[in-house]
Image: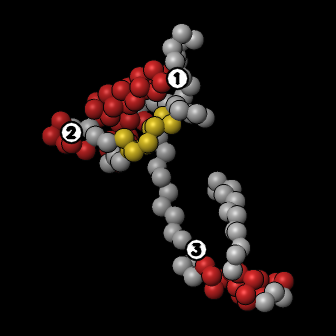
Amino acid sequence: MGASTASPNVTNEDTKVADELSHLQLLSSIIPRKEKERISLIHHYHHAIRGFSAMLTDNEASLLSGHSDVVSVIEDEIVEPQTTRSWDFLEEGMQSKWGLAKHVTSNMIIGVIDSGM
């Protein structure tokens, strides 16, 4: 939804509450009255962007993207796990790449780098 429009006299908490109410009003304006129980915000974003996530139909997402206060609507991508056999995968890779013994996988910390792609 873009940058926050709060004045310097308003606290961060007040801004967050106002944003959440604004998000709920926006959802209420696009979800049909007979389905009001579906109005549910999954998460509010306050740091890098001002926005929210919600479960919407294709039609509702289209209506939301046309709203004057909305910068963009982005569909979440469903990502499948690359492996369900992590220990086997790690042990084989360590043995073949570095010639390490199998027992080195105990007491090990693995760091995950998320490139955002």
Image quarter (top left, top right, bottom left or bottom right) of the C terminus = bottom right
In the picture, measured across the screen, residue 24 lies left or right of residue 103, that is: left
* Residue, disc 1: 12
* Residue, disc 3: 82
Residue 40, quarter of picture? top left
Q: Earlier in the sequence, mark 2 or mark 3?
A: 2
Question: Is residue 92 depicted above or below 33 in this figure?
Answer: below
| Front position in the image: 108 or 12 | 108
Q: Earlier in the sequence, mark 1 or mark 3?
A: 1
Mark 3 crowd level (few <14, some 14–19, many ≥20, 10 Å Cα): few
Identify residue type, mark 2.
Lys
The disc at residue 40 is none
Q: Residue furthest front?
A: 107
> x%, y% of residue 111?
70, 64
The residue at 70%/75% (across/down) is 107
Mark 1 crowd level (few <14, some 14–19, many ≥20, 10 Å Cα): few
Q: Residue furthest right?
A: 98
The residue at 71%/73% (across/down) is 108
Real-space Cα distance between discs 2 and 3? Answer: 37 Å
Q: Nearer the viewer, mark 1 or mark 3?
A: 1
> x%, y% of residue 20?
40, 30
The residue at 70%/69% (across/down) is 109
Image marks 2 and 3: residues in contact by CB distance under 8 Å = no
Identify residue type, mark 1.
Asn
Q: Is residue 16 visible?
A: yes
* Residue, disc 2: 36
Q: Earlier in the sequence, mark 1 or mark 2?
A: 1
Real-space Cα distance between discs 1 and 2? Answer: 29 Å
Q: How many marks on residues?
A: 3
The residue at 48%/24% (across/down) is 13
